[in-house]
Amino acid sequence: MLEFELLNQIFAFAGSSLGAACLSPDYADMADVTLICESRTFPCHKVILSTRSDVFKAMFSHNETKEGQTNRVEIEDTDAATLEQLIKFMYTDKVDEASLAELASSLLRAADKYNIPKLKFLCEEAICKNLDVANAAEALILAHLHEASHLKDVVVDFVTSNFVKVSETAEWTNITNSHPKVLAEILTTVMSKVRQMTMSCNSNTS
């Protein structure tokens, strides 16, 4: 435990320069684990992945696991471009703005799975900045499934303010058919907002 706390402190101090150095080809032969996604391979260092993610730490702490025995990790629930950005963030504590805008949803899923809160929050922020009628329902489902509280608050407010337009999108049908809890929460919020508006109107006319 103390070892990883010390490594976290070192990483916080040295930060991106240390991680970027480890990502360079000069250190590829020192990698002790390979992440595999689609047709691409990513040589990595267990100590850095474990320091940044307690999920990876648990994975590499048990020699009886497949990953512990083979030093190869098959990543099947995301794409290679997203994994590349996830790895870069774990090494450098930074994410490319263009990649973040393009991959925010898939990166949020990966950040949630591997428990990387800072990256998850950055993804939430990126989705919030690009929120519109067309993607609001999808963002709401994403926030619900991955307990992204900041994103959920923003999207719920957006949907309640644009309910008619959002409810006409194809993704809204997905909510009504597959996510009754999300639908119930939205409808409750909409009704609450309507009551508040009604009470405000009544007070202004009295």
Image: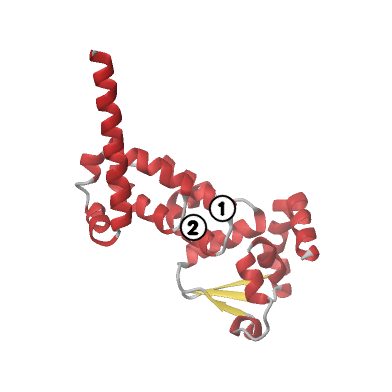
- SS type, badge 2: helix
The residue positioned 66% from the left and 66% from the top of the image is: 49
Is the residue under label 1 in contact with that under label 2 (CB below 8 Å)?
A: yes
With 104 as the anchor, is 179 left or right in this view? Answer: left
Disc 2 packing (10 Å; few <14; some 14–19; many ≥20) = many
Q: Amino acid at mark 2?
A: Leu
The residue that label 2 is drawn on is 107
Q: Residue at x 48, y 76 (%)?
A: 39
Which label's residue is closer to the chain start, 2 or 1? 2
Out of 12 and 179, give the one closest to the viewer. 179
Quadrant into which the N terminus falls:
bottom right
- Nearest the eye: 39 or 164: 164
Q: Residue at x 29, y 22 (%)?
A: 200
Q: In the rendering, at what x and y percent does residue 29 appear?
A: 72, 75
Note whether residue 178 is visible: yes
The answer to which image quadrant residue 173 occupies is bottom left
Crowdedness of circle 1 by 10 Å Cα count: few (<14), some, many (20+)? many
Residue visible at 74% across and 55% down? 11
Vertical side of 91 occupied by 206: above or below: above
Residue 62, by quadrant, is bottom right
Which quadrant is home to the C terminus? top left
Position of 148 with respect to 168 (left or right) is right
Secondary structure under the numbered disc 1 in the rendered image: helix
Question: Is 141 displayed left or right of 65 in the figure?
Answer: left
The colour scheme of the drawn protein is: secondary structure
- Pointer 1 residue: 119
Mark 1 residue type: Leu
Label 2 to label 1: alpha-carbon separation: 8 Å
